[in-house]
Image (spheres, rainbow, N blue to C red):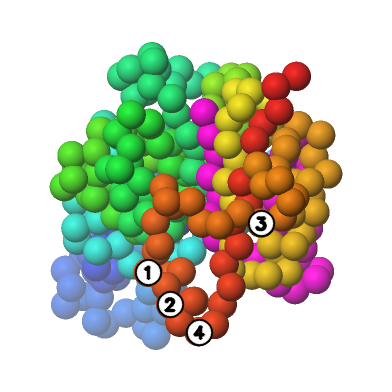
Amino acid sequence: MSENHASPSAPATAGEQSGAPAAEATTASPAAASSAAASSAAAQQARGRREPMFPDGPAPDPAGSHHERRIRSFQPRRSRVTTGQGEALRRLWPKWGLDIDGLSKLDLGELFGDPELPVVLEIGFGMGEATAKMAAADPGTGILACDVHTPGQGNLLGLAERNGLDNVRVANGDAIILLREMLVPDSLAGLRVYFPDPWPKKRHHKRRLIQPEFLALAATRMAPGALLHCATDWEPYAEQMLEVLSAAPDFENTQSDGGFAPRPDFRPLTRFEGQGLDKGHVVHDLLFRRKAH
């Protein structure tokens, strides 16, 4: 899940811990000094675990899902939160953010302030640039953007505010729990999975998100006719996606030839994607529609 950012604090000295003057602490034996230092370090680590940098922001593990024994398709990416991202998290998380705790069903109409607004779920939005562009281009669609990357969450919130995008909500946590526990049947107008982790090593293929079990779950939360849109620049994963999606009984390929789709206009070309194309990478889009049964 997302990382727990400790509040910065200076380690206490042995004298400060005991209440004795600092000058007296310097006369302690080497063994006592070593013990005090270890105690200080342990106390600082404990404070870090208890005190996230954003107390009203995204929770470190909202669903306590480390207790659930299940292979995951994601892993936390620990990187520095900038001042701007941190400020956006502090101010905007209570307004536009939600933790995936798995404890209650989401009312998407209430979440977006419009019961008639169609909502698509985006799983894994990185730094959020493409999400913000899609939201700006289509204000009549709500985007529930899910990720575990704290800097990206803050960046997307900041982009949404600066561009006046009130059709974006940011979800923190495991998308499987969101789909399984918190979304009601037929509630999604679409599902987007752009450039998921390809888990290239063969022994890690079981961690890939696009699997038959995931598609069966996703289909129950997507309205009939809703579009599932995947994109990847890892060709072996693209081939597996096409194979798994083509075999999924709840989905049908929008392409008459049963193959990949051209990139639709609504999916913007991202900086990451452009860098890959410059290196000769081939990007594949897959557009499958939820069948009406």
Going 24% across and 50% down the picture, which residue do you hit? Answer: 159
Q: Amino acid at mark 4?
A: Lys
What whole-number distance in Å separates the C-alpha atoms at marks 2 and 1? 6 Å
Check residue 97 in the rendering and tell me which mark sits there, or answer none. Answer: none
Question: What residue is pinned by disc 1?
Answer: 271
Q: Amino acid at mark 2?
A: Gln
- Asked which secondary structure carries label 4, the reply is loop
The residue carrying pointer 4 sits among few (fewer than 14), some (14 to 19) or many (20 or more) residues within 10 Å by Cα, namely few
Is residue 51 in sight in this rendering?
no
Question: What residue is pinned by disc 4?
Answer: 279
The mark closer to the camera, 3 or 4, is: 3
Magenta-drawn segment: 189-217
Rendered view: 38 above or below 56: below
Q: Position of residue 162 (x, y in %)?
A: 16, 47
Q: Amino acid at mark 1?
A: Arg
Disc 4 and disc 2 in contact, CB within 8 angstroms: yes
* Quadrant location of the C terminus in the rendered image: top right
- Asked which secondary structure carries label 3, the reply is loop
Q: Position of residue 129 (x, y in %)?
A: 33, 56
Check residue 275 in the rendering and tell me which mark sits there, or answer none. Answer: 2
Q: Position of residue 205 (x, y in %)?
A: 77, 63
Which of pointers 3 and 4 lies earlier in the amino acid sequence?
3
Residue 150 within the segment the image draws in magenta: no
Q: Looking at the picture, tell me which residue is in the foreground, 158 or 276.
A: 276
Disc 2 and disc 1 in contact, CB within 8 angstroms: yes
Q: Amino acid at mark 3?
A: Phe
Which of pointers 3 and 1 lies earlier in the amino acid sequence?
3
